[in-house]
Amino acid sequence: MQDKPLITHMYTADPSAKVFQGRVYLYPSHDRDIDKDQDDLGTQYEMEDYHVFSMDSIPGEVVDHGLALHVDQVPWATKQMWAPDAMEKDGKYYLYFPAKDKEDIFRVGVAVSDQPGGPFKAEPEPIKEMYSIDPAVFKDDDKSVYLYSGGLWGGQLENWRSGSFNPDDKEPGPEEKALCPIGAKLKDNMLEVAHSPVPIQILDEEGNPLKAGDEDRRYFEDPWVHKYKDLYYLSYSTGTTHYLVYATSTNPLGPFTYRGRILNPVLGWTTHHSIVEFQNRWYLFYHDCELSGGINHKRNVKVREFFYNSDGSISLMDP
Ligand code: FUB
């Protein structure tokens, strides 16, 4: 049976799912219903605000909690409020989001609320040392929280190869080591990283780093970390080849070993997801462009239950 769009009164994408207060909360991008030419830098993704959604069961009614944060409420940001994620600590909720600053550089910001549905109040400055797009937050069993980010092309990950932002830094050549997402533990205040972000290495089955030319497997964007039976899973999008794939590790900051594909390409260029356990079942949230008939910047989120194999592997799904 084909999955159905979960939200139909607006376009939504990049669904980060988290369980708070017994409900599953969705933190998606809010795609705008505007006409735009497409380019490789993603200027068509001109989003300017976030709405948060929640459900008490899957399937179930999806509640729209209204405007959670608008770019005009973020002192340092100017445009492109792309894929966010959220985390709870001590009864407060933290929304992590990327946006371009006044110099057109993607930074990662954080905004705080007393409620998982918002509204959120943005910190005056972006998180120091974090950069690029697609922040994802993972809380380990010992309550340590890790923040990941990174996306190629419009996400500017390759522009940081020399250690600071340089628009002339390019992707590595096909035989060179692929670029990796970055990750860092957060301080207890949830507003700062506890150390400089490190590259999250992704290795092949022989222990060699994936190469940039290995486009079926190498990292492009959309990092997501979850834990299943003591193993950490890093899942991500391969971008140009449009797969969702995963790698596993015994450490939340890696190195991870590539394991396989999770989802075949969807209708639309981007593929972006999250994985969450809710009411003792595991779900994959993802998006496609069904509602718009395939317009890349007008997407809709979907959900699918999945099952682990006995060896902890995840079988390939078709959208
Ligand atoms: O929604 C804008 C961008 O498209 C996201 O940041 C990427 O992951 C891709 O889904």
Image (cartoon, helix red, strand yellow):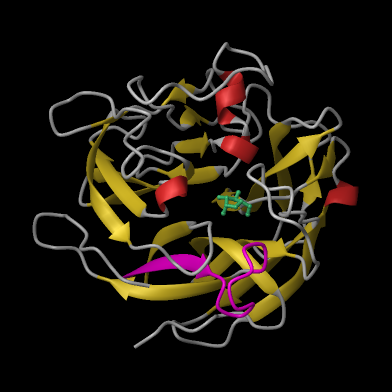
Q: Is residue 179 visible?
A: yes
30 shown above or below 258 = below
* Residue 187 shows in the view: no
Comparing 138 with 90, the one in front is 138
Q: Position of residue 266 (x, y in %)?
A: 44, 67
The x, y position of residue 24, in whole percent, is 51, 70
Q: Is residue 245 left or right of residue 20?
A: left
Which residue sits at x=48%, y=58%?
271
Decide if residue 172 is on the left or right side of residue 191: left
Q: Quadrant of the N terminus?
A: bottom left
Judged left or right of residue 17, residue 297 is: right
Q: What is the magenta range?
A: 282-298
Task: Residue at 57% x, 42% y: name it.
Answer: 135
Report the number of discs: 0
Q: In the depicted view, which residue is nearer to us: 173 or 43? A: 173
Residue drawn at (50%, 61%), measured in percent from left and top?
Answer: 18
Query: Is 242 positioned to the left or the right of 112 in the image?
Result: left
**Percent coordinates x, y for residue 238 in the rendering:** 41, 46
- The answer to if 297 sits in the magenta stretch is yes
